[in-house]
Amino acid sequence: MLSLSTAKQLKETGLIWTPALHDFFAIPERGFDDKVFVISDVFVNVEPLRGHLSATFQGSVEWALDHVVVEELVWLPTEEQLRDELEGRLTPEPRPEFRMISSPDGYVCEFCVRDQHMRFEATSASEAYAAALLYMLEAGL
């Protein structure tokens, strides 16, 4: 799973999250940094509350936390979601091909953008995709 620090960077760099069923997220700076939540059709719902899109925690009477505004949450995209986001940004390229390679030290994500060969290394495939996506976001692509 993607680290919370990388997920925060993606959010700060402009990655937009539209909450969907089975998405993972964190609630930073509220004592839940080490917890991972998932939107399901039973426990957490995303709904408007007092004019803000909020994640509401239903059926958890022991919790004092009733809701959190979605803007305060940090999406923890899966490897597939990161790959899809990266692929979507590469689609305008003439040859939007990229590949993930397993290396002795982890993983390498490679692709070409604007005739430049890009290479991003990380300890996990998710982190390698995230590094590539951060580059694309920072470059405004």
Image: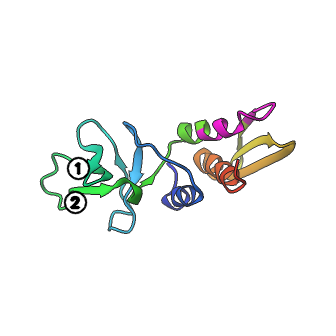
Pointer 1: residues within 10 angstroms few (<14), some, or many (20+)?
some
Q: Callout 1, which amino acid?
A: Phe
> In the image, 1: left or right of 108?
left
User: Which residue does the image show at 27% across and 43% down from the upper left?
Assistant: 45
Q: Are there few (<14), some (14-19), or many (20+) residues within 10 Å of tag 2?
A: few
Observer able to see residue 105:
no
Query: Residue 69 at what x, y percent from top left?
Result: 33, 56
**Which residues fall within the magenta stretch?**
85-98
Above or below — where is 135 with respect to 92?
Answer: below
Residue farthest toward the right in the current orientation of the protein: 115
Side of 138 where 48 appears, left or right? left
The residue that appears at 35% across and 57% down in the rendered structure is: 35
SS at mark 2 in the image:
loop
Q: Are marks 2 and 1 in contact (CB under 8 Å)?
A: yes
Q: Does the magenta portion include 29?
A: no
**Drawn side of residue 73 relative to residue 11, left or right:** left
Name the residue beneath numbered marker 2: 65
Q: What residue would you read off at disc 1? A: 57
**Which amino acid does the dot numbered 2 rest on?**
Leu
Q: Indicate whether residue 87 is drawn in magenta.
A: yes
Looking at marks 2 and 1 on the same chain, the residue that comes earlier in the sequence is marked by: 1
Q: Secondary structure at mark 1?
A: strand
